[in-house]
Amino acid sequence: MKLTKVILGGLIFSCLGTATTLYLLNKRKTTPKGIIPIRPFNINKFLGKWYEIARIDFFFEKNMENVIAEYSLNFDGSLRVLNSGYNFKKKKYKISAGKAIYNYNNEGKLLISFFGKFYSGFNVISIDDEYKYALVTGNSRKYLWILSREKEMPLEIIEDFLIKAHNLNYDISKLVWTNHS
């Protein structure tokens, strides 16, 4: 009987801890001011492999080419995120595994972590009906990605994404165009 109470108490404490963490994560600024993630959003259609076409460069992706992001469903309902690419200066491949939380609110908004309990916003701000091309931002205007299911992307879609990003006050002159050789 005592063991059952300890296990039940541990389960309740664990659930409360998870709920509190999710609440605090959602209270944090995970979407830049004025940015609205797309609705409706179908997480199942988003799963799979995405090629990075362009990004606003930051230190984790500095000197990277052949950058790919893969999203898959974990047993607990979270997402597995696997980012990979080739650092052409260091001449070696880099792989980063992370976890994303999606709260199924029909919105293109995820929380992603590559460092334990430290989560950051990941916001799909434009996507085509077939989920082949996506424009994504992080939790500030320092982050922007253009993603495609293929290594190349039609110019008219790139231009459309550039106009949208510019109109949302992103500095598109800072975009680095990813080489996929």
Image (tube, helix red, strand yellow):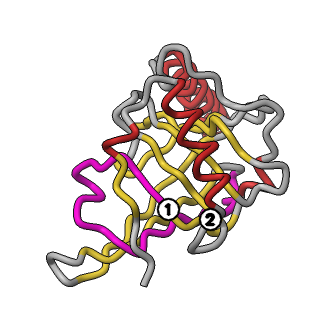
Q: Nearer the viewer, residue 76 or 8?
A: 76
Determine the residue positioned at 62% across, 62% down.
148
Q: Position of residue 150 (x, y in %)?
A: 64, 72
Nearest to the eye among marks 1 and 2: give it.
Answer: 2
Q: Position of residue 171 (x, y in %)?
A: 36, 33
Residue 53: mark: 1
Determine the residue positioned at 66% across, 63% down.
154
Q: Where, by quadrant of the figure, is residue 65 drawn?
A: bottom left
SS assignment for the magenta stretch, majority: strand
Determine the residue positioned at 59% across, 47% down.
159
Q: Nearer the viewer, residue 36 or 114?
A: 36
Q: Nearer the viewer, residue 132 or 29?
A: 132
Q: Which residues are magenta?
A: 52-76
Q: Is residue 62 left or right of residue 140?
A: left
Quadrant location of the N terminus in the rendered image: top right
Q: Secondary structure at mark 2?
A: loop
Q: Is residue 112 left or right of residue 172?
A: right
Quadrant location of the C terminus in the rendered image: bottom left
Packing grade of label 2 (10 A; few <14, some 14-19, many >=20) is some
Give me the C-alpha separation between circle 1 and circle 2. Answer: 8 Å
Residue 33: mark: none
Determine the residue positioned at 73% across, 55% down.
46
Whether residue 46 is situated above or below residue 97 in the rendered picture: above
Say if mark 1 contacts mark 2, CB within 8 Å.
Answer: yes
The outermost residue toward the left is 90
Whether residue 99 is situated above or below residue 5 in the rendered picture: below
Q: Nearer the viewer, residue 123 or 81?
A: 123
Magenta-colored stretch includes residue 66: yes
Residue at which label 2 appears: 153
Magenta-colored stretch includes residue 40: no
